[in-house]
Amino acid sequence: MKLTSVTLAAVLIGSTAFAAEVGPKEVKYNDDTAIEMSLTGMAGDPTKGAVIMGTKSKGNCVACHEITALSNAPFQGNVGPILDGAGDRWSAGELRGLVVNAKMMFEGSVMPSFYQVDGFTRPGNAYTGKAGKEPLAPLLSAQEIEDVVAFLTTLKDE
Ligand code: HEC
């Protein structure tokens, strides 16, 4: 490949973005429940966050949570609390901590850890030995987590 200055710049920008991203194993909780620092250093996009939360192959948060703002999602479950007003109840750091690994806030939660690659409680392994080998890919990417957090912070009661 001929390295033009354009491709070189693209490679440099690409690797800088990667270096700035906080990986699933580097996440730092500030007080065991909140992650104050953005995982990517880039603002999340609430519109994308809403799509991720309502999409089955992505966050699929609506499988367990009702969210009035996503009322056009085909199904909304009630395993977890209604998320209306979540942006009033929790800080952005707490919401990030919750989505990355809900077990930090709620011990033994059935809510999936969306940004974790190992250390899972995995009954599948004990019962069937068929659970996949860790580390697994996180359910959501760092930027997808930021998008979801950005949308959650818009969920205000007023
Ligand atoms: C398998 C069910 C399930 C899924 C899927 C799930 N959650 Fe939860 N979530 C829960 C439960 C249950 C709780 C309540 C805490 C507990 O007891 O574990 C909860 C709690 C929460 C809370 C705090 C509740 C409050 O007071 O506002 C937030 C915020 C939240 N979830 C966001 C999400 C987001 C965002 C997603 C998708 C990326 C998601 N959840 C996916 C089950 C789920």
Image (tube, rainbow, N blue to C red):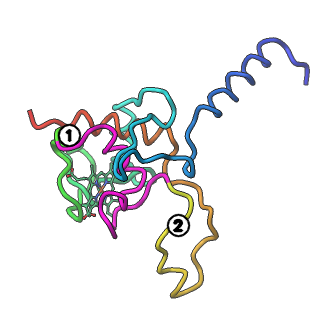
- For mark 1, does the 10 Å Cα neighbourhood hold few (<14), some (14 to 19), or many (20 or more) residues? few
The kind of residue tagged 1 is Ala
Assess mark 1: CB under 8 A from ligand 1?
no
The image quadrant where one finds ligand 1 is: bottom left
Q: How many numbered marks does the figure carry?
A: 2
Q: Is residue 27 left or right of residue 3?
A: left
Q: Which residue is mark 1?
A: 69
* Residue 119: numbered disc: 2
Helix, strand or loop at label 2? It is: loop
Number of the front mark, 1 or 2 = 2
Q: Is residue 24 above or below residue 110?
A: above
- Quarter the C terminus occupies: top left
Where residue 104 appears, as percent x and y from the top left, is 36, 58
Where residue 64 appears, as percent x and y from the top left, is 27, 60
Where residue 4 appears, as percent x and y from the top left, is 84, 14
Identify the residue at horizontal 39%, vertical 34% (top origin).
48
The kind of residue tagged 2 is Gly
Where residue 113 appears, as percent x and y from the top left, is 43, 58
Identify the residue at horizontal 19%, vertical 57% (top origin).
81
Which residues are the magenta region? 89-115
Identify the residue at horizontal 32%, vertical 66% (top origin).
107
